[in-house]
Amino acid sequence: MGALVLLVDDSPTIRSQIRLTLEQLPEFERFVEAGDGLQAFKMLADTQPDLVLCDLIMPVFDGLKFLALRATRPDLSHIPVIMLTAEGDSNRKVEVLDRGASDYVTKPFNEKELLARVRVHLRLKLLQDELRQANMRLESLAVTDGLTGLFNRRYFDTLLVSEMQRTLRYKTPMAVILLDVDHFKHVNDTYGHPMGDEVLRNISRIVAAGVRSTDSVARFGGEEIGIVLTQTDLPGAIEVAERLRQQVAAFSHTLGDKTIQKTASFGIASFDGAGTPVSAQQFVQRVDQALYRAKKNGRNQVVTWSPELSPGEVESSLSSG
């Protein structure tokens, strides 16, 4: 699909002339038009064109006012604006560029010059779009677990600190659930690592689908999955964990001609911003203590943290299987 161009001029005749000129390039197949800067800004936000050609002098709402409105929307700053001006004053041209225009063309314009400038800025725009998308992919990879597609531990740790700070400030409750696949080592030893990977992927999908969009799910480590529940008190977290526990236990994991079922143990701790302050690390330790007790008591169950749980009893939930 060809590039979309927004043409802005109070003269329909000039807009038609520019359009006929640009149609000489195969890159340009789609056009939208506006008769003043205010209408142009609305169309800019609605259509997100690849390029804008805007007249500088227009009645009521001119090109500079259009650039001023555009400056209020940083998300539109990547769209190049070429200003068309009949003024030869170099200071005026400098002002246009300072206000955010990518370039200017003096009217009456030379068709070849206009086509050359438009083509250059379109190429720059496409390169910048590709770079921005590549950066977004890199940012996503930096916080995503490759196997499960969940967030990774790095993201979990950062998010937890942020959510605990939010809770301290607004006194809205939050909770963290940590689940561990029961006897996961047995899966790898008996059925092979491909089946183990399939189990982790399936359980990750169950958990991600079973929480709200405002909650976050991360691969905490190994076969452990962490869930940060925003604006959720302890009873609410218990309800979520119990529902997930049942869904995990009921699911059948199939790979090739082998089908197995697995359970998971759940530990929970909540935080409402009251009482003695705790660090994010201490909070995670509480969740881990509850998880360890769930596994020690027979697995496939939900346990909530309480002060009676001794930190010394947690040898390592990771090594318990």
Image (cartoon, helix red, strand yellow):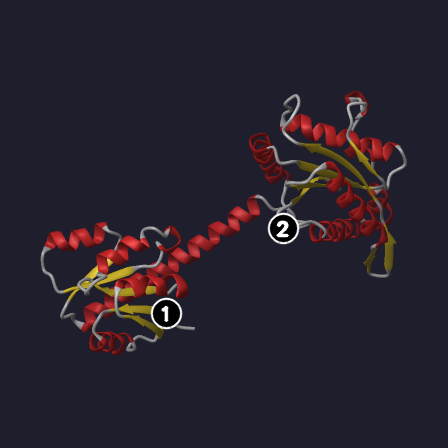
Residue 102 can be seen in this image = no
Please give left or right for residue 281 compared with residue 23 in the image.
Answer: right
Q: Element at badge 2?
A: loop
- Disc 1 crowd, CA 10 A, few/some/many (<14, 14-19, 20+): some
Q: CA distance from mark 2 to mark 1?
A: 33 Å
Q: Element at badge 1?
A: strand
Residue 46 vertical placement versus 265 (above, below):
below
Image coordinates of residue 257 in percent, x first then y, are: 86, 61
Viewer-nearest residue: 256 or 88: 88
Q: Residue at x 64, y 38 (%)?
A: 153
Please give left or right for residue 1 compared with residue 105 in the image.
Answer: right
Residue 283 image-quadrant placement: top right
Residue 278: numbered disc: none
Viewer-nearest residue: 178 or 67: 67
Image coordinates of residue 318 in percent, x first then y, are: 77, 34
Q: Nearer the viewer, mark 2 or mark 1?
A: 2
Image coordinates of residue 48 in percent, x first then y, are: 39, 63
Residue 277 vertical placement versus 78 (above, below):
above
Residue 295 vertical placement versus 49 (above, below):
above
Residue carrying label 1: 4
Residue carrying label 2: 213
Residue 298 can be seen in this image = yes
Amino acid at the residue labelled 1: Leu
Please give left or right for residue 138 compared with residue 178 in the image.
Answer: left
Which image quarter holds the C terminus? top right
- Disc 2 crowd, CA 10 A, few/some/many (<14, 14-19, 20+): few
Amino acid at the residue labelled 2: Ser
Q: Residue at x 32, y 68 (%)?
A: 6
Q: Residue at x 22, y 56 (%)?
A: 64
Which image quarter holds the N terminus? bottom left
Q: Earlier in the sequence, mark 2 or mark 1?
A: 1
